Image (spheres, grey):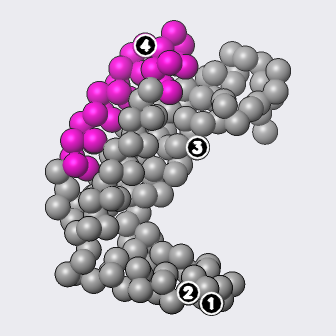
Amino acid sequence: MALTLHDLTPVGLCVATQDLFDVRKFQNGFCDNTIMKTRDEELQDKLVSVKRELNSYATENKFLQGHKAVIVSNMDKINALVISRFVQQDLRAVESIAAHSKDLMTKVLNASSFQDIAALEPIFKSKVSLPVYDLFLQYMRKSNIPMV
């Protein structure tokens, strides 16, 4: 049996979502590849303007609301995938992930700053991301899919 992108989706979403909790990296490194390295002149002016707004106290809130929406949406997808794929494998772990995820979703929605979101990253990692990865590894072993 071969490993597919379908199999990797829950882990991939966890990795992407965990990256969103690193708000300092998000704010400071926003589109730096396009702005500084590839020097795409067509996009550069627009992206620099967005980056300035993103890092400005006066306009930060509009970006915060969108950032929160993406995190919560990703966590909802993680929950759906974990429940549908791993519930028969380890019901307690799935229930724990779902409960912690829902709690984190509430905390993210109630966050009033990017720093509030950043403070939640260790909880996401320990209570959602790593347990999902553990379930994925169990699934891989059970399916006899070779692991490196």
Residue 24 location (% of width, % of height): 38, 72
Numbered disc in front, either 2 or 3: 2
Label at residue 12: 3
The quadrant holding residue 114 is: bottom left
Q: In the rendered view, does 108 fall on the left or right side of 81?
A: left
Region in magenta = 81-109
Residue 36 location (% of width, % of height): 60, 88
Numbered disc in front, either 1 or 4: 1
Amino acid under label 3?
A: Gly
Say if mark 1 contacts mark 2, CB within 8 Å: yes
Amino acid under label 4?
A: Leu
Q: Residues within 10 Å of mark 4 (few under 14, many from 20)?
A: few
| 1 or 3: tag closer to the N-terminus | 3
Q: Secondary structure at mark 4?
A: helix
Say if mark 2 contacts mark 3, CB within 8 Å: no
Amino acid under label 1?
A: Glu
Q: What residue is at 41 percent from the left and 63 percent from the top?
A: 22
Say if mark 1 contacts mark 4, CB within 8 Å: no
Residue 2 location (% of width, % of height): 82, 27
Q: Which residue in the rendered view is the most extreme toward the top? A: 88
| 4 or 2: tag closer to the N-terminus | 2
Q: What residue is at 48 percent from the left and 25 percent from the top?
A: 82
| 1 or 4: tag closer to the N-terminus | 1
Q: Toward the viewer: 8 or 51?
A: 51
Q: Where 80 falls versus 41 (above or below)?
A: above
Q: In the rendered view, does 116 fall on the left or right side of 98?
A: left
| 4 or 3: tag closer to the N-terminus | 3
Q: Check disc 1 and report the residue beneath it.
A: 41
Q: Check disc 2 and report the residue beneath it.
A: 44
Magenta segment, principal secondary structure?
A: helix
Gap in angstroms between the C-alphas marked 1 and 3: 31 Å
Q: Residues within 10 Å of mark 3 (few under 14, many from 20)?
A: some
